[in-house]
Image: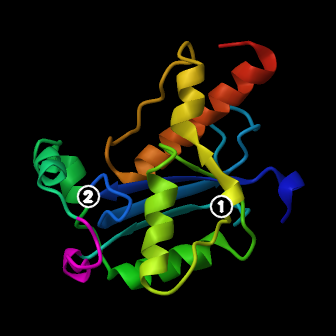
Amino acid sequence: MNESSKIEVMLDLETLSTENNAAIISIGAVKFDPRATVGELNNPADKEYAHFYCNVEFHSLSREEFHIEGRTVQWWMEQKEEARASLFTDPIDIQTVLGKFWTWYGAESLPTWGNGAGFDNVILRNAYHKFGGVAPFNFYHDRCFRTLKSLFPDVLYVKPTLAHNALSDAEAQAIHLQKLFNFIHTGAL
């Protein structure tokens, strides 16, 4: 796979902090072509277009290694029960989650979008570093979805099926990005 393949990754993390060393509690991602028809995220017959979703066991997040802040935990307590409950579906330890993400991502670095220049990509990269590894994407492939969507406020936000579920958020953000690319290239909303 190369740059001309147009496959990119939309990443979304759920965390217990907003710091760059935040405790990750869920990772969701989708491989997609931002230039494809809006809403066309994956082709089930093609493994290149795939989803990733894993929850992290809370007890595997050592306070010395990962930042947890009270205001973020409080914020989680105020979210819908369905979103909170989704965090407890088949959780595994953080190192295993990072290994699974690496395997899913593949050997070649792709443009990887996060919702904030200093959030998803940075936090995930720092988690890999904590265990002596490196993120599967190179720094020059970091992309900021939040910045792009702020430049085009007339392109309506795509709501996730379940807000604050990492996979649901990643899917909605990928569709929104497709809408943004469509608007940039055609001017059509």
Would you say 132 lies left or right of 180 here? left
Which quarter of the figure has residue 56? Answer: bottom left
> Which of the numbered marks, if any, corresponds to residue 2?
none
Tag 2 near tag 1, CB within 8 Å: no
Q: Does the stretch in magenta take in 38?
A: no
Residue at image position (23%, 80%) is 62
Residue at image position (10%, 48%) is 74
Would you say 177 lies left or right of 87 here? right
Magenta: main secondary structure: loop
For label 1, the residue is 139
Q: Amino acid at mark 1?
A: Phe
Residue at image position (40%, 84%) is 95
* Magenta range: 58-67
Q: CA distance from mark 2 to mark 1?
A: 30 Å
Residue 48, image x and y in percent?
A: 72, 63
Q: Is residue 151 visible?
A: yes
Question: Residue 130 or 171: which is nearer the viewer?
Answer: 130
> Which of the numbered marks, if any, corresponds to residue 86?
2
What is the secondary structure assignment of the residue under circle 1?
helix
From this viewpoint, which residue is outermost toward the right?
Answer: 4
Q: How is the image coloured?
A: rainbow
Q: In this rendering, which labeled residue sits more in front, label 2 or label 1?
A: 1
Q: Amino acid at mark 2?
A: Ser
Residue 7, image x and y in percent?
A: 75, 53
Image: 171 above or below 25: above
Image: 93 above or below 56: below
Quadrant holding the N terminus: bottom right
Residue 91, image x and y in percent?
A: 29, 75
For label 2, count other residues whose C-alpha is less than 10 Å away and answer few (under 14), some (14-19) or many (20+).
some
